Amino acid sequence: MKWTVIATWKMAAEGVKLAETALREAGTAEAALTTVITDVENDPRFHSVGYSGLPNQAGVVQLDGGYMDGGTLSVGAVGCVENVASAFTLAKQCADYQFNNFLVGEGARQYAIQSGLEMKKLLTPEAQMIYEQRKAQPESLSSYKGHDTVGVCCLDSRGMLASGTSTSGLFMKMPGRVGDSPICGSGFYADSDIGAAAATGVGEEIMKGCLSYEVVRRMQQGQEPQEAASTLVAEFTQKLIRKRGQAEAISLICVDKDGRWGVGTNIKFAFVVSDQNHSAKVYVAEPTT
Ligand code: SD4
């Protein structure tokens, strides 16, 4: 039985390992995504996702998350949601309906409460301390400080693909700011006929190229995942530099319907891959520009 999981950043390694057992026994891509992403969301060591995420300029943790089922093309997403333990789980729940698939702010929070999802105070003393220190020494907010989204793409043994994300977004973002992570086609995309993708980096850049959709489109045109991801990120980075004078961090992961995977990045980028032959291997990619 063939299956593949690819996830952004080393922090996903433990969750990917946890997901392997179920995937070996015909577990679904949806369940694998949930295992990996909630493992990162619940872990207070990681200050860029879920519990213990870093707050916005007002000292409030606001989460973004997204989910796409490549079998049905169902999409669910939440933006700027507060006090929800798992933005991903809430996003996934939003994918269950015909309408109301993308909820933000207070509406998303109320829906989480109504749905009986776990609510949590997300700001930990450690994250609060990092916030206070940063407030005392303001730096450019556009600079990327390794503030990492967990993004996961999975092909399961039934041939179904799914993609999902969860993040507390850029540290010191403006209240109300939403990144690429809950935006279908930018932060994530999945179509079981072709492939799945997810992005991490500066959302304002990733959105400009709808990169998750674009890499899947290139796979549909016949490019191998690795070629599609690396040439897309390199070309798009060059385009940003040409049109805007600079390009911020962009990293992209993808997997195709045959389980082949690829990565494109314009920074040093760690990611995790697991398949029927290899257990949770951490790779480090160098910029492909
Ligand atoms: C965002 N893309 O909110 C996210 C942040 C991120 O690695 O991925 N950082 O823009």
Image (cartoon, helix red, strand yellow):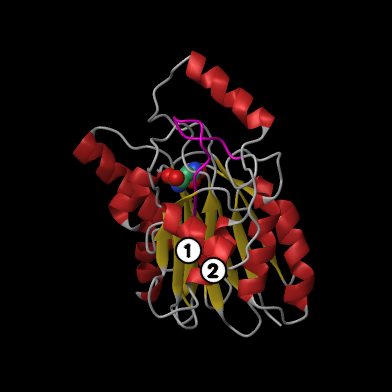
Residue 249 picture quarter:
top left
Name the secondary structure under disc 1.
strand
Q: Nearer the viewer, residue 46 or 135?
A: 135
The residue under label 1 is which amino acid type?
Answer: Ala
Would residue 226 be found to the left or right of residue 83 on screen?
A: left
- Mark 1 residue crowding within 10 angstroms, few (<14) / some (14–19) / many (20+): many
259 shown above or below 110: below
Task: Classify the position of the C terminus by image quarter.
Answer: top left
Image x and y of residue 250, in percent: 43, 45
Q: Secondary structure at mark 2?
A: helix
> Dot 1 corresponds to which residue?
197
Q: Is residue 236 left or right of residue 168?
A: left
Label 2: how many residues lie within 10 Å, few (<14), some (14-19) or many (20+)? Answer: many
Numbered disc in front, either 2 or 1: 2
x then y, percent, for residue 150: 57, 52
Residue for badge 2: 92
In this view, 111 is above or below 106:
below
Quarter of the figure with the N terminus: bottom right
Residue 55 part of the magenta-drawn span: yes
Question: From what the image shows, is residue 134 above or below residue 208?
Answer: above
Residue 199 location (% of width, % of height): 46, 54
Which comes before the other along the chain, label 2 or label 1? 2
Residue at point 59% right, 64% down? Answer: 89
Residue 152 appears in the rendering: no
- In terms of secondary structure, what is the magenta stretch mainly? loop
Q: Identify which amino acid the numbered label 2 is placed on.
A: Lys
Distance of label 2 from label 1 (alpha carbons): 16 Å
* Most distant residue in the left direction: 243
The stretch of residues the image draws in magenta is 53-64
